[in-house]
Image: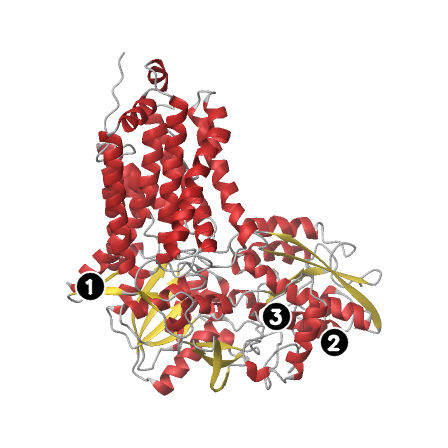
Amino acid sequence: MTLFLQQLVNGIGNGVVYGAVALALVLIYRTTGVLNFAQGEMALFTTYLAWKFARSVPVAAAIALAFVIGFVGGAIIERVLIRPVEEARSPLNVVIVTLGLFLGINALPQLIFGTDSQQMPKPWPSDAAPGDVVGTTRAVKVGAVSVSWAVIALALMMVAVCALLWLLFQKTRLGLALRAVASNPESSRLVGINAGLTLMLGWALSAGLGAIVGPLVAARSTGFDASLMQGVLVFAFSAAALGGFDSVLGAVVGGLVVGIAEALTTQYVDPLNGIEVLLPLLLILGVLLIRPNGLFGRRTVERV
Amino acid sequence: MTRSPTGRLVAVLLALVLVAASCSKRDSSNTVTGGGGGTGNNGQSSIDTSNCSVDPTKPIPGNTIRLVSSFPQSGLTAAFSEIADGWKAYFKMVNTEQGGVTIAGKKYKIETKDKDDTYDPAKTASNISDLVGSGSLDSVFGAFMVVGTAGNLAIRQDLAAKCVPDFFAATGSPALGDPSFPWAIGATNPPYTVEVKAFAEYLKKNKPNARVAVLAQDDDFGTAYIDGFNQAIKGTGIKVAKVEKYKPGAVDVGTQITSLAATKADAFLSGGTLLACPDSLKKAVAAGWRPLTYVSGTCASKTLMGLAGSAGDKALTTTNLEDPLNPKWANDPAMKEYRTKAKQYSPVANLDLTNGIVAYGWTQGALFVKALQAAKAPTRLAVMESVYNMNGVRAGLLRPGFSITTSQNDRYMGEKVQFGRYNAAKGYFEDLGSPEDFEGRTASITPKAVITGNG
């Protein structure tokens, strides 16, 4: 039983990471209608920035700085790279640009910061012993199960982000405008919404969120390099597809489901030993066959 | 872009493409078909040259030996390119200080050419195919220190057909000693199966009834550890408690370690490499599990063990080289030569001499020069035969008392190993006990399927 619970906690630990990145994917999809394949790499770049800043300022301040840069950078990317192709009206064009960004932004930190693995200082309780560069994350014992502070911190961050997003989307005029533009840019322009500004804001928010999630994911890892987000992104896409690409709650639940399923597969399904990545794909396939819009996604209704 | 089912479909498809792309880099199992045949009747040589598309007994024209290589120089495994900095520095030293290498009374300069393969075996194959061309001696003598198991398996068939040597493949895979492919040979890395045999011997002496948890990569590299260890503990009191595998490239092996820790095994064979290795050590400590731990020789680097930090304390590994990080070698003549000359002739600025893989590359360069000098003629066949005819050759930073011995029936070079135990506070491995010598025994302690890849 202890083993089961420990693997459940491991799964939740991975799940919050997948969920957090899925959240950024959902955020950009909800606000701009774009599937951003470069989401993980954008987060990677700001993670490297946070790591660099953390050498001279406290890690929390470094993450805050990275957030600001991510926010501004996201807006710039939307304005300079996405908007010109978006006007061509083909969803594929934007997807191709984001795939290009995926490769480009992945190479950037390797050119600037090198390819060696680095260690992110931990913005949560940790212990350092001789030989440690950044220390080891402390854990809280709940019965026989140990819960790492990294998981607690990521989970708290996720709850806070969900709450803020809910407030933004449901309770503010800006949120209403964001939703309107994503759903129908043309009509929203006609009713006087500055569609350009809201699209830019969508990218900025999502890149900013990535700049918070990235450093936390890196700090949770033993070390990080330019591959930090690549493994995560596949699972995050699974999480978002599972939950429904337009649902914030869906991203979180999807992330947890994928993470827990992965952990329990490792423990209990020996034939899939080493290829647990099959599992989220099977999950997506299953869910999309039954509910094409994901568990929490809204069905698209079109007027004929 | 509107929210449409098409958009979702595109997303899922692209996600699948990403997965497929990341999976395609796994060591794919090699297809062995026939090969060159082991024993020929070409004089004393047992290298069959009857099917060579290029005559391997032709002497090198002019006075330049041209070597080609392929290894990652960009991307996540770019750190491996530092191996080449080591051997390039050595060749430059020989060219500059001795005017080249003497083969059968004539001096030749060593020239090298290489391409970036980002650790992708398909790219390795096309790089080497470009560099080797038809195999004419005017453009190439042989491949040297191509990095990676899968990359070398991908090129050896083509090179064998042209009888172009694949010298010193940078891998510890026992598949690079397969007698069906006499034109390819691995470098001085202790073969992975020798590593685990040594660990099994260590356990027999110190924990004869050990229950061992095994972590391995889900590919040929991991299989060599698992199958090699299973064979090594046959007939002993040692048992494997559980094996967990992880996907190549994984950075987090927390769930695998929870599963292994739950077995309460008293020994841990951590066969992972890259980030999975230090992560396995950290997660074991986090799980409150402190078994007797062995880490793969591929993990015993400054970078990876530095990531593990205190979690790596007391972990064992094996090596056959002097570690530039360990101050005990400070006054060793070979280390002193390395420290001054590798720096002087370094192809790059800021070469990190304390990095063990630079020292490893340097050593391979030194050993290859010895093999060239000992060759009876400046031909591919003669040099290949010289490589298979090393008798107690010492070169580079091989540890005192360690030497390389090969023969037509023994195609493995690094068969003697020294245990090291990690001292986290000092940041390097300290020698532990006396060396274990498996000279000439690699083939017998390695399951046949691991050598031939017909698992």
Report x, y in % for residue A268. 23, 58
Mark 1 residue element: helix
Q: CA distance from mark 2 to mark 1?
A: 60 Å
Placement of the N terminus of chain A among the 4 image quadrants: bottom left
Q: Which residue position is annotated with label 2?
A: B374
Q: Nearer the viewer, mark 3 or mark 1?
A: 3
Q: Nearer the viewer, mark 3 or mark 2?
A: 3
Q: Chain of mark 2?
A: B
Locate residue A155 relative to residue A208 in the image: left or right.
left
Report x, y in % for residue B138. 79, 55
State whether residue B157 is above or below residue B367. Answer: above
Locate residue B404 relative to residue B3 in the image: left or right.
right
Q: Chain of mark 3?
A: B
Mark 3 residue element: loop
**Residue under the point 57% across and 58% down:** B152
State whether residue B261 is above or below residue B249. Answer: below
Residue type beneath disc 2: Ala
Between residue B52 and residue A179, name the one nearer to us: A179
